[in-house]
Image (cartoon, rainbow, N blue to C red):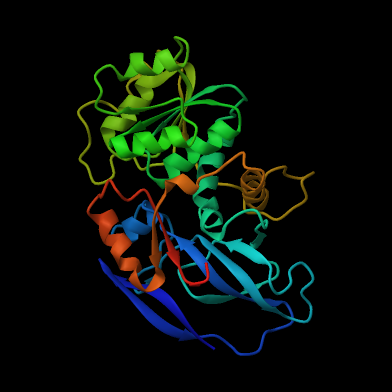
Amino acid sequence: MDIRRAVLHGKCDLRMETATLPDVLEPSEILVRTEVSALSTGTDLGNYLGDSTYVPGAPNYPRWVGYSNAGRVLAVGSAVRTLKPGDRVFAPRPHQSHYIAKETDLLVRIPEAVSSAQASLIYLTCLGLAALRQAHYETGENIVVIGLGVIGLATVGLAKAMGASVVGVANSPIRARVAVELGASAGVLSDDPAIASAIRREFNGLDADIVVLTSNPWSTYFLALDLARYGGRVSILGFPGRGQAMPERNPLDPNPLYSKQLTLLGAGASPKVECGAGDLRFNLRRNLEYILALMATNRLDIEPLISHRIPSEHMVDAYELARQRSKDLVAAVFVWDRAE
């Protein structure tokens, strides 16, 4: 069968092309039709701009783009037992209209109560969940999220659903307002000269237990160090200094790193090993299932951060908005199935 897929041929050269999938499935294979895929304004945008060297193992051009796909099972091979036609599944697959997967691949069933648009964002949300787990988050802690792109905003909603007090730090009033819609007690601007005292007011006079940093500039990295409490943790999802020269200030200056006994974490990875919960309680699959369960019970609703729903054939428009740093673009999803 013929399918459509997005292929990046070079810097800012994204093309929709046709490809062919086999007409007959192997016994262990599953055919999925994409309903919605999501744009990552971090990794995806970096690839689009010709800057993928920050991601280890990134392929050369021409290359696929995207890794957040919500679709519906069309057919299954004779040996498949875990899924059936009609089921909806999330998979970390590129932007494409259809794909064939093995039953053993990462395919996570989407509950009926969760829209495909919201489900397409769960991998990006899972990055925030991994950042909190790696920082050993405890229920009720104070969390600051710096950088309110799609990952940062999803992290705000997730942290609130997990019982945290949350403040979002944005470079745009639009993103700050969305953070409050998602459960933050406040959204503050990163250039506010009184930002530290404003955040302490939200935390009853305390500093942040955990700072989740999704932003790249050195200025926000140093802000994260300054906002963390003594013994606090800074979970780094962004790429500090990306595209910038080294700063005059030492990124590992003993003050505050040593004086506050801070822990810095390169975060975001969930174990991909498939195993029983007795061996590893939360691997990538169970983290994704946990997020979907939060969504299905309305404890987590990230629909408010979807600012753009774009037909798949026009997805380059979203990449261009992201390239231009449009503040109106919060999260973009690409609609492949017009019924969706």
**Above or below for 142 versus 63:** above
**Above or below for 122 versus 214:** below
**Above or below for 334 versus 255:** below
**Above or below for 48 versus 267:** below
Left or right: residue 203 compared with residue 101: left
Q: Say how many tags the image has.
A: 0
Left or right: residue 85 compared with residue 209: right
Place of residue 74 in the rendered image (x, y in percent of width and height, measured from the top left):
65, 77
Residue 257 visible, this orientation = no
Q: Nearer the viewer, residue 201 or 105?
A: 201
Query: Which residue corresponds to the image point at 46% horizontal and 85% vertical from the top-left?
Result: 19
Q: Nearer the viewer, residue 271 or 316?
A: 316
Place of residue 70 in the rendered image (x, y in percent of width and height, measured from the top left):
56, 63
Query: Which residue corresponds to the image point at 25% horizontal and 50% vertical from the top-left?
Result: 326
Residue 292 visible, this orientation = yes
Place of residue 114 in the rendered image (x, y in percent of width and height, measured from the top left):
61, 54
Query: Which residue corresponds to the image point at 39% horizontal and 18% vertical from the top-left?
Result: 199
Q: Quadrant of the N terminus?
A: bottom right
Left or right: residue 300 compared with residue 293: left
Query: Which residue corresponds to the image point at 59% horizontal and 29% vertical from the top-left?
Result: 136
Residue situated furthest front in the rendering? 339
Place of residue 262 in the rendered image (x, y in percent of width and height, measured from the top left):
45, 21
The answer to which image quadrant residue 112 occupies is bottom right
